Amino acid sequence: MRAAAFTDLTGPDGVEIVDRPTPEPGRGDVRIDVEACAINRHDLWILEGDSAMVETDDLPFVTGLDVAGVVDAVGDGVTDVAPGDRVLLCPNETCGTCRFCREGPENLCESFSLYHGGLADAAVVDAARLVSLPDSVGTTTAAALPTAYVTAYHMLRRAAVSAGDLVFVPGATGGVGVAAVQLAAVLGARTVATSSSASKLDRVAELGADHAVLGSDPDDLRDAVSDVGTPDAVINHLGGPYTDLGLSLLRRGGRMVVCGRTAGARSEIDVPDLFLGHKRVIGSTMGTQADLERLVSLVEAGDLTPEVDETYPLESTAAAFAAMQERETIGKLVVTP
């Protein structure tokens, strides 16, 4: 089978199409004929050598978390799915035995990790991590959900966002940002979305953003967002200076959820503003399989249409990562082997 492998951790030029033996499913596993696999900032960090998860000794490395396709073969002990079933993978990998796996939520697992291997013609995965796809939900659409949309949905839940709330989403044109805007609208909340691109902001407005603010300088954004209102919640996938920005804008008792570091791995905050304002800063990683099942049901019902900017054949996986690196796109990029 073909796979898009990282052969050098230097950026998109380090992606090569390689031949590998077609894997056989072990006990409890299934093999999926991969029809679609979205890429994420997580994958790009690995490709750029900016992740401790993968070292040069691990090369060639095949990434790809967000796998959708058709079951091709099943291993011993698998009874819940069968060849021909259309499925979507929840990429969470958990130990199943720690207190957090027992009590939930599962993404707090002490050994939490993520599946990699979907950028290939076939992938062997844990059968228990599969979500059934209704006939009305295409695999390209489904592949957009597991990382970006699950992450955004779980963040909105952790921020206790409800109808009528005002939610600030800085950098709202990437995968998590777009997902947060769309899902906030599903929840009946209002959003303030920002971007340095006017054309991307126009598209985010079409996707449900109530207020669009052009710019990326935190000081300028502070004034512009304040003119709109006082946010009840902030969905922060950027980190860096946007953490202090979000904290300063929150209402008393407001909640900011942080899931990323695209703008920087370190943030400085006004500590008195934090405690005097009874504000909360909450860390969040991914979400749960139940979150993913809920999102699939929203798509099936027509309440959510994930934003897919472009699809790429497996041979053009390097071009997909180049487009992500150059920030040319809005929403998700999906590879279709």
Image: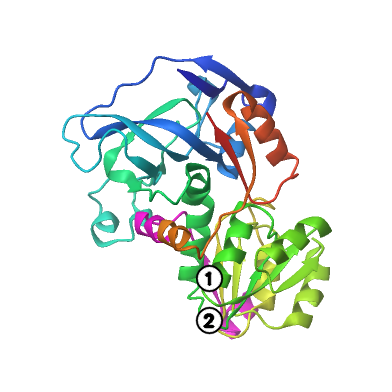
Instruction: Name the residue: 54% across, 23% down.
Output: 5
Residue 299 position within the rendered picture, expressed as x and y whole percent measured from the top left:
47, 58
Above or below for 69 versus 304: above
Residue 244 position within the rendered picture, expressed as x and y whole percent measured from the top left:
68, 68
Residue under label 2: 163
Instruction: Name the residue: 54% across, 66% down.
Output: 183
Task: Give the amino acid at mark 1.
Answer: Val
Nearer the observer, 326 or 248: 326
Give the extent of the magenta segment: 268-294
Q: Can residue 49 be seen in this view?
A: no
Nearer the observer, 50 or 156: 156
Above or below for 213 versus 82: below
Disc 1 is placed on an element classified as: helix
Q: Would residue 256 be found to the left or right of residue 11 on screen?
A: left
Q: Would residue 283 be found to the left or right of residue 102 on screen?
A: right
Residue 215 position within the rendered picture, expressed as x and y whole percent measured from the top left:
82, 63
Residue 250 position within the rendered picture, expressed as x and y whole percent measured from the top left:
64, 78
Magenta stretch holds residue 270: yes
Residue 270: image tag: none
Farthest-out residue, front = 136
Residue under label 1: 186
Task: Give the amino acid at mark 2.
Answer: Ala
Quarter of the picture holding the N terminus: top left
User: Decide: marks 1, 2 in contact (CB < 8 A)?
Assistant: no
Q: Quadrant of residue 252?
A: bottom right
Magenta stretch holds residue 191: no
Instruction: Name the residue: 68% across, 83% down.
Output: 230
Disc 2 is placed on an element classified as: loop
